[in-house]
Image (tube, rainbow, N blue to C red):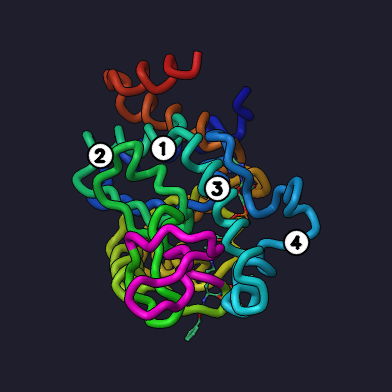
């Protein structure tokens, strides 16, 4: 059930969405929660219960215990491979039919935006399904099948690691450049399903605000508040985004397929 205040804010956002030339959407783990993937705030379960994500997601942790870190990411890869995009991902794809440019800037490493069909996705923190060499950071697509965990780079024998950005590591230059450029060009900027605690991603909404964009911060913590050009919208992305699609473009067939999919 949507909160009345959230519904009122959605109504205020409809004209901005209809008139937008370039919508940028920053996403975090919360947009994949309704696909069954744990967020970083959800207590880690099972084997991983005694660790904090920040502990396992660092080059130091990998140097200290490569097998532990490799297996943590292997576990997350299994979860991701079993997951499908949800109505929030699908609504963002449908927006592309009506808005000249929609750019997704994601902190997620699950690839679900591309899987849903979004045509312009900037991966700030890499992707779980890709690998690279821990020594030279160059991509690794195959390796000799041995019992070694992690496997070894076929070029230099170094350890293979997931192609994700660990804490303390620099973001991919092109991705960060494109994300900053898009944030400065956006006339409407959404931050969906992120706690906004990790930099430099967390600063992007404020870069857009500084450039005069309308900015919407939405997750399950913020209060519903409209202080234009900044809006706070509380609620599940899988409900809010299809609803906004429906209100902005009532004739949209996409809305029916998206919502029925889950009925
Ligand atoms: C770097 C990939 C520099 C791997 C990740 C300035 C100040 C302070 C600290 C720093 C700073 N600058 C840099 C730092 C350090 C650090 C940082 O920010 N630390 C934080 C913890 C304070 N940043 C870095 O280390 C970055 N690198 O700065 O390099 C540098 C420069 C030169 C030379 C060398 C280095 C690298 C950061 C990237 C780390 N990698 N991920 C992996 O996935 O394991 S970060 C990872 O954590 C995610 O990608 C994401 O970014 C973050 C988790 O945040 P969220 O996605 O927001 O998830 P969270 O669980 O926190 O929140 C979920 C939200 O969803 C909640 O709000 C909830 O309400 C909401 N929600 C839940 N369900 C729903 C929902 N919303 C809607 N619908 C629902 N259904």
Query: Is the CB of the residue bearing disc 3 within 8 angstroms of ligand 1?
Result: yes
Residue indicated by mark 4: 51
**Which callout, 3 or 2, points at the residue further toward the start of the chain?**
2
Question: Left of 169 or right of it: where is 19?
Answer: left
- Tell whether position 164 is magenta: yes
Q: Main secondary structure of the magenta part?
A: loop
Question: Left of 196 or right of it: where is 260?
Answer: left
Residue at horizontal 53 percent and vertical 64 percent from the top: 148
Res. 89 mark: 1
Question: Left of 48 or right of it: where is 13?
Answer: left
Extreme residue toward the front, this view: 146
Please state which of the two labelled residues, at mark 4 or mark 3, is closer to the viewer: 4
Residue at horizontal 60 percent and vertical 27 percent from the top: 2
| Quarter of the image where one finds residue 60 | bottom right
- Label 4 to label 1, Cα distance in Å? 29 Å
- Asked if marks 3 and 1 touch (Cβ < 8 Å), the reply is no
Circle 4 SS class: loop
- Label 4 to label 2, Cα distance in Å? 39 Å
């Amino acid at each position: 059930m949507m909160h009345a205040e959230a519904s009122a804010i959605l109504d205020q956002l409809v004209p901005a969405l209809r008139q937008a030339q370039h919508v940028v959407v920053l996403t975090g783990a919360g947009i994949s929660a309704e696909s069954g993937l744990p967020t970083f705030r959800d207590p880690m379960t099972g084997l991983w219960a005694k660790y904090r994500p920040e502990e396992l997601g660092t080059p130091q942790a990998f140097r200290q215990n490569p097998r532990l870190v490799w297996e943590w990411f292997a576990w997350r890869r299994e979860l991701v491979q079993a997951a499908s995009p949800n109505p929030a991902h699908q609504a963002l794809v449908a927006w592309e039919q009506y808005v000249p440019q929609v750019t997704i800037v994601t902190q997620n490493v699950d690839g679900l935006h591309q899987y849903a069909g979004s045509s312009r996705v900037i991966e700030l923190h890499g992707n779980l399904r890709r690998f690279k060499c821990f020594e030279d950071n160059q991509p690794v697509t195959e390796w000799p099948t041995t019992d070694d965990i992690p496997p070894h780079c076929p070029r230099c024998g170094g350890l293979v690691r997931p192609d994700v950005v660990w804490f303390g590591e620099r973001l991919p230059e092109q991705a960060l450049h494109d994300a900053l450029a898009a944030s400065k060009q956006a006339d409407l900027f959404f931050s969906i399903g992120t706690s906004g605690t990790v930099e430099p991603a967390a600063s992007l909404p404020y870069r857009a605000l500084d450039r005069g964009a309308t900015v919407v911060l939405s997750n399950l913590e913020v209060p519903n508040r409209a202080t234009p050009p900044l809006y706070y919208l509380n609620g599940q992305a899988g409900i809010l985004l299809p609803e906004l699609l429906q209100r902005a473009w009532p004739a949209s067939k996409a809305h029916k397929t998206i919502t029925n999919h889950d009925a």
